[in-house]
Image (cartoon, rainbow, N blue to C red):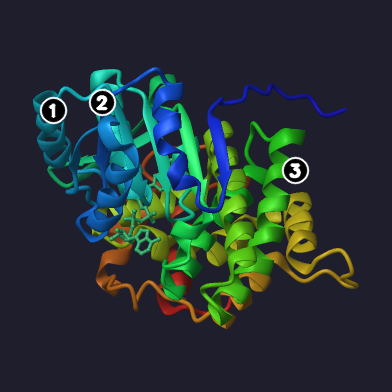
Amino acid sequence: MREFLYSSPTARIVFGAGTLRNLRQEVEHLGRARALVLATPGQAALAEEAREILGPLAAGSFTGAAMHTPVDVTDSARRVVDEVGADCLVAVGGGSTTGLAKALAVRTGLPQIIVPTTYAGSEVTPVLGETENGVKTTRSAPEILPETVVYDVDLTLGLPAPQSVTSGINAMAHAVEALYAPQANPVTDELALRAISLLSGALPRIVADPADRAARADALQAAWLAGTCLGTVGMGLHHKLCHTLGGSFDLPHAQTHTVVLPHAMAYNAAGATEAMRRIAGALAGPRAGVLPDAPTAVHDLIAGLGGPLSLRELGLGEDDLPRAVELATAKPYPNPRPVTPEGITALLNDAWSGDRPQ
Ligand code: NAD
């Protein structure tokens, strides 16, 4: 018999195409009337569109969101919250913009409506990572979890194919690690397997045609399911490595997840045989005969989608590897296979070169 404890994060989810136009009623649903719209500089036009839809419920906008949620950016945005008298936050963008909304919510208590435009999944987690003086710290609290998520498939049509691939594999990584998490349970298992299956089907179709709305809908739904796994159970070696590489070596988030995932899976395979068998089944589909090896199947999927495959191509120096090993093994954390300096050295050497896992 399998024993488990299951506690689900709750958020209101609106999913569809063209749902950005529901923003005004979602602000009203929260009983609020002065929304501050958040975005990155690259998505300022989308912030403007959101403001127009909100009409009199738009109090202002802040379009300075940045990767890894720098505290000085949050401080600047907080001044805007006060200046315009905002009573809720509307974030339109990827994980970076969501991070800013969460950082403001935890400081002000304001409710959040998130409109995700990537597959990062942060919108359904109570987790916030912030950087200050070059150090990234993560905290988790119920008040960080956004109240409402508006998924609008149309907003993902313009996400370029390379970013769609890396963001999609970022989502797949949440699902993979959920399957061997100590808190794994029947609900997150099913969400994770469905997410892996949807992503492995959708990403090749998106690369072939980034405007394929059905493939985009599958990928966005997978992002929600995988993000829900991330928000419900603890993550292991893969997320720890990516956190270290992103926070301490300034490597780009989704690309790092894409390079590391097959290697972290290969490392953990011996300690998570049943999870790997189920992942292989989800990747291969229901009509598969002999199941593939899950880590090599993920590597081959990424290679077929155009990569990236190596930490070297992301700009990590070979001489940075010993420090990365030291940071990733400094504190113990739950993982299906013991984390040793020798093992992580071999893993990171393989990921740095981009070799196909054995
Ligand atoms: P991102 O939000 O940094 O976006 C990358 C770039 O893509 C940005 O310039 C953005 O403006 C642009 N972009 C986003 N959507 C677009 C679209 N549809 N079309 C065109 N351009 C678009 O990248 P990300 O990978 O979504 O998020 C990474 C951040 O999210 C990291 O800081 C990471 O730590 C965080 N994150 C947090 C959690 C969590 O649970 N706390 C989970 C996942 C990611």
Picture residue at 64% right of the left edge, 31% below the top: 183
Determine which quarter of the picture holds residue 61.
top left
Query: Residue 57's x, y, as percent?
Result: 29, 30
Characterize the local packing of mark 3: few (<14), some (14-19) or many (20 or more) Cα atoms within 10 angstroms: some
> In the image, ligand 1 is in what quadrant?
bottom left
The answer to whether residue 343 of the structure is visible from this angle is: no
Look at discs 1 and 3 and give the one toward the viewer. Answer: 1
Report which residue position mark 1 lands on: 84
**Sequence-earlier tag: 3 or 2:** 2
Badge 2 marks a residue whose secondary structure is loop
Badge 1 marks a residue whose secondary structure is helix
Looking at the rendered structure, which numbered label has been put on residue 34?
Answer: 2
Contact (Cβ within 8 Å) of mark 3 with mark 2: no
- Mark-to-mark CA distance, 1 and 3: 44 Å
Residue type, label 2: Arg
- Front residue of this view, candidates 358 and 41: 41
Picture residue at 34% right of the left edge, 20% below the top: 32
Picture residue at 12% right of the left edge, 24% below the top: 82
Query: Residue 112's x, y, as percent?
Result: 37, 30
Residue type, label 1: Val
Query: Residue 158's x, y, as percent?
Result: 42, 68
Looking at the rendered structure, which numbered label has been put on residue 190?
Answer: 3
Characterize the local packing of mark 2: few (<14), some (14-19) or many (20 or more) Cα atoms within 10 angstroms: many
Contact (Cβ within 8 Å) of mark 1 with mark 3: no
Query: Residue 342's x, y, as percent?
Result: 47, 59
Residue type, label 3: Glu
Q: Is residue 123 left or right of residue 207?
A: left
- Mark-to-mark CA distance, 2 and 1: 8 Å
Characterize the local packing of mark 1: few (<14), some (14-19) or many (20 or more) Cα atoms within 10 angstroms: some
**Sequence-earlier tag: 1 or 3:** 1
